[in-house]
Amino acid sequence: MKYPASSKFVSGAMVAWLVAASLASAEDDSRIQALEKQMAAMHDEIAALKGERNDLSEIEAVASKVHFGGYGEIHGNFEENGDSAFDIHRLVFYLGYDFADWIKLTSETEIEHAFVSDGSGGEVLIEQLYVDFLFGDAVNARIGRLLAPIGMINQHHEPTLFMGVERPNVDKYIIPSTWSMDGAGIFGSPLGWLSYQVYVVGGLDGSGFSADEGVREGRIEERSGLNDPAVTGRIDLFPAEGQDLRIGVSGFYGGTDNANNGGGNGTDNDFGLYSADFEYKVSRCQFRGIAAWGQNSDPQNLPAGTGEEIFGWYLEGGVRVMPESWKIGKLAEADLVPFVRYEEYDTQYKVASGTVKDGANDRSGVTVGVNFPLTRQFVLKADYQFLFSEGATEPNNLFNLGMGWVFQ
């Protein structure tokens, strides 16, 4: 059968169209497959980026809960007619973690005197390690190793917070700063003008008491004994709204029959320590003072010479003298604060019948110096200490230089 020429043309055109369509379809399929592969690869890349972003978010979330800081002090102590030394006195690290907005861990680890070995005088010590459970302004709980809330320096002992190179002697011989204790208790600020703390803690080791250092060596720095526990606390009042005035009272009472790692030491005695302090700032002037009195119920059961009563006090005043016109450039945050402090401290303020009182333990001193904070977190210091006692020989005076810092 013969077809018209036009029919042949149509048939050829159809074949050509079908071939072209087939080729186009194959090319489209190839392009679609390539696009699908590209989309799959992009999907994988996006998923990986999301995973990295999620990982980064998790890291950032954890990092926001970690708190790091610390402080340190370097001193030069020059004793008149005696020894002089350069002392990396302490380097302290803070580490904290927020398990939740109401469960917070705080720690403070200290290295003293740069080198630690038997007989070196240096030490590594965990001064604080506690967990706070925050329920509200009025009542919160604290458990762990905490600082005794006695006096002003013990809980606020960073070098930027006190005058002079060394801490006041009252805060060494009467209130043994820094004084750590293990226990639990509550704290809060139920009113805008009042705050409080109260804890049940491990007691002191009466076998470490002495005539010249009072209760200082009775602190248990390792595993706190609970054989004869104690209670401690403080109240702070802010009586004048709009004025920088604080008045505080604090106390400690407990048995001394405690030993490291538990058990007793055979000292049947109770020790109480009570303190009142104040801080007041007005214009460029700042004042602070403290009085602290302690009593042993049975000093005859303690090491020979231990005082039945200990007592100390000091008053301190300083004034910021740097003109505002000088506070520019590198000195924008700086100030210059000359100060003077007078203190008396006696670790044998009263002795038991039959004990001879040593006048060398009835001491006083005048410290004159200057604090030069270059920033709010870094300070240079210099002072001269005139030291006296009722003993046969006067203690050597001291000239001190120092620098200190805090970061957080």
Image (tube, grey):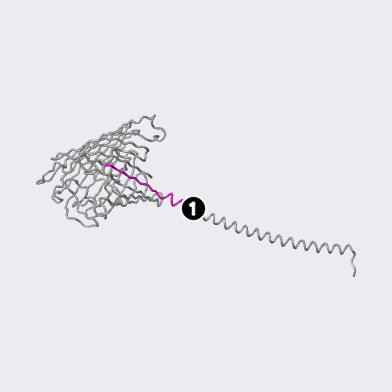
Give coordinates of residue 139: x percent, y percent.
34, 46
Rendered view: 292 above or below 300: above
Depth check, front residue: 194 or 337: 337
Magenta segment: 56-76
Q: Tell me which corner region of the image, top left, top right, bottom left or bottom right, holds residue 377.
A: top left
Give coordinates of residue 407: x percent, y percent.
37, 44
Is 174 colored magenta in this rendering?
no
Horizontally, residue 61 falls left or right of residue 168, namely right
Give coordinates of residue 107: x percent, y percent.
34, 50
Query: SS at mark 1?
Result: helix
Q: Tell me which corner region of the image, top left, top right, bottom left or bottom right, holds residue 5.
A: bottom right
Is 58 colored magenta in this rendering?
yes
Horizontally, residue 94 falls left or right of residue 2, namely left
- Name the residue carrying label 1: 56
Q: Residue furthest left?
A: 354
Q: Tell me which corner region of the image, top left, top right, bottom left or bottom right, holds residue 174.
A: top left
Quadrant of image for the C terminus: top left
Quadrant of image for the N terminus: bottom right
The residue lying at 90 percent from left, 68 percent from top is: 2
Horizontally, residue 102 falls left or right of residue 203, namely right
Number of residues whose C-alpha sits closer than 10 Å to that of mark 1, classed few (under 14), some (14–19) or many (20 or more): few
Task: Say how many tags the image has.
Answer: 1
The residue lying at 88 percent from left, 62 percent from top is: 6
Give coordinates of residue 307: x percent, y percent.
15, 45
Amino acid tagged 1: Leu
Depth check, front residue: 264 or 77: 77
